[in-house]
Amino acid sequence: MLGGAAVAAWGAVYPGAQVFGRTLRITGDGATLALTFDDGPNPAVTPGLLELLERHGARATFFLMGSHVRAFPALAREIAARGHAIGNHTETHPSLIFLPARKLHDELSRCDEAIQSAAAYRPRWMRPPFGFRGPALSGVVHRLGYSGVAMWSKLARDWRPQAAEPVIRRLRRAGGGDIVLLHDGDHRMTEGDRQHTVAALAYWLPRWKDAGLEFVTVDEIDPSRAGLRDASSEKVN
Ligand SMILES: [Zn+2]
C-alpha cells in the first residue's frame, strides 16, 4: 500500500491522477487532435512554427509564460491574431506543488494580466509547470474564473535539444482524441532551441491531416464531452 507521501507525489506528476482535482486530458472526440505548446513565446522558434501551422491550416494552443509574454508582447499578440488559443503557464514557471495559495494566485494572475494586456486574449485554461499540481491549485484556478487545469494524453519529450527523429518517433503514438504536449519555448531562457519540435511537426502535420484529423484548440474542447475524467495517460518521467 502506498503511504501518504507517495500518493501525494504520484498525484502531483501523473497526468491521469485525480488526487488534486479533475483535469482536462483528452479532446473527447476521436476525430480531433489538440496540439499544445508550452513555455513560449520564443522569438527563435514561434514565428516559424506559426508559419508552419498556417501552411497546414492547423490551429493550436500556446501555454505562455507571463515573463516571456512581457519580453515579447508582439509575438503573443501574433499568436492570438492567427486564431490560436492562449493558455496560462504561470508568470515564472515555478513548481506549484508546495506553493501557498497566495503565491499561486500571484503567479497565475500576473501571467493572466500579461497575456490580456499583450494579446487582448482572456485565457480559459492553465497548465502547471512540469505538470506538478498541489492541493491548492484547483481552488485558485476556479477562483480566478478559469475553466480548469489542462494536462495532456501524449507527450513528445521535446524539452531538451535533440535530433528530430526521436521526437517524430514518439509522436507516432499521438492520434484521434489526444491532447499533445509540445514545447516552442524553454522556461530556463528566452530563446531556447526547439527546431527538433518544428521539424517533427513538419513531418506529422500533413500525415495527421491525411488521416482525417481535425486540429482543435483547447478552448474549443467541450469539457463535459472530454469528461475531465481519468483516461489512459503517460508519466512525465
Ligand atoms: Zn513549462
Image: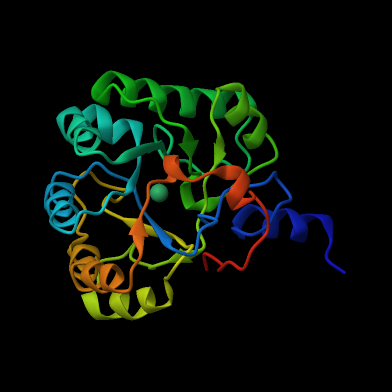
Decide if residue 235 is on the left or right side of residue 135. Answer: left
Farthest right residue in view: 1
Q: Which of the 4 quarters of the picture holds residue 209?
A: bottom left
Residue for point 25% across, 64% down: 197
Q: Can residue 8 be seen at all in this image of the molecule?
A: yes
Q: Which of the 4 quarters of the picture holds residue 169?
A: bottom left
Residue for point 18% across, 68% down: 202
Q: Can residue 163 be seen at all in this image of the molecule?
A: no
Can you say whether 80 is above or below 10 in the image? above
Q: Viewer-proximal residue, 233 or 9?
A: 233
- Give the x, y percent position of residue 4: 82, 55
Q: Viewer-proximal residue, 210 or 152?
A: 210
Can you say whether 156 is above or below 166 in the image? above
Quarter holding the N terminus? bottom right
Residue for point 26% across, 73% down: 210
- Give the x, y percent position of residue 144: 55, 22
Decide if residue 205 is on the left or right side of residue 24. Answer: left
Q: Which of the 4 quarters of the picture holds residue 7?
A: bottom right
- Give the x, y percent position of residue 220: 43, 42
